[in-house]
Image (cartoon, rainbow, N blue to C red):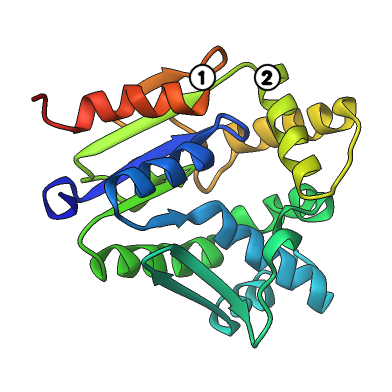
Amino acid sequence: MSARIGVITLDGSAGSGKSTVARMLSERLGIPHLDTGAMYRAVTWAALREGIPFEHSRRVAALVKRLCFRMGPDGLDIRLGRRRPGGELRAPEVSRAIHGVSHNRAVRRALIRIQRAAARSVSGLVADGRDMGSVVFPDARWKFFLDADASVRARRIRRDLARKGILRPLSEVLRDLKRRDAGDRSAVVTPTVVPPGAIRIRTSLLTPAETLRRILRRILPRR
């Protein structure tokens, strides 16, 4: 099945459900999940940990070589030395600072090379992010773009943070989300766009399971 389907891209705004649905889709199809957002968060986390100012773009980009990104059957494994950041990638300070990394051209070039190499190392892949179908895998057979109302997305993000033990007021989460949306849309390097040929899905009123079913109806042959 994975050889026939190949790369599936899920792009969308923060909190649209793309990462949750991507994990569910990879499990359903038996192919790895490439969480590219976690890769940018890992570089951001490493820069904060090392005390490297984000305006020092070359020093930030050099962190990519020190981080280990390895694709396995269960998805992406991230390490800095012997340390796995895990839940630290979702910390508020990482979320607030991630634009300092995602807008860094050198970081993007380095991570795109790793992402494409990861796809070549497996027979099928579910990749979610912000420019998967438009930049990283423009020739992917199946492209999806997920979106939802900002208030819905903020509640989802707040709920996900709470599960990780991070409690934040909804107003603060929404404020950060709107700031991130504005930055994503106006980004000079790679703004958030609907990839050519992508299937758009509004997830405001959909559960992850319902979104998954809509995607599966598109990519699986009807019996």
Q: Position of residue 75 (x, y in %)?
A: 43, 62
Q: Is residue 194 visible?
A: no
Give me the residue at 57% from left, 15% from top. 204
Against 215, residue 114 (above or below) is below
Give me the residue at 52% from left, 40% from top. 20
Q: Which residue is mark 1?
A: 203
Q: In the image, 52: left or right of 196?
A: right
Query: Which label was assigned to residue 132?
Result: none
Which amino acid type corresponds to the residue marked 1 in the rendered image?
Thr
Residue with the most extreme bottom position: 81
Element carrying mark 1: loop
Q: Choose between 123 and 116: the one closer to the eye.
A: 123
Q: Residues within 10 Å of mark 1 (few under 14, many from 20)?
A: many
Residue with the most extreme top position: 205
Quarter of the image holding residue 168? top right
Tally of numbered tags: 2
Against 194, residue 121 (above or below) is below
Q: Is residue 48 visible?
A: yes
Q: Residues within 10 Å of mark 2 (few under 14, many from 20)?
A: some
Q: Which residue is mark 2?
A: 152
Q: Position of residue 52 (x, y in %)?
A: 79, 74
Q: Position of residue 84 (x, y in %)?
A: 66, 75
Against 55, residue 209 (above or below) is above
Element carrying mark 2: helix
Q: Which circle's residue, 2 or 1, is located before the other in the chain?
A: 2
Check whether the beta carbons of the residues at disc 2 and disc 1 lie within 8 A of each other: yes
Q: Choose between 74 and 76: the one closer to the eye.
A: 74
Which amino acid type corresponds to the residue marked 2 in the rendered image?
Val
Q: In the image, 115: left or right of 42?
A: left
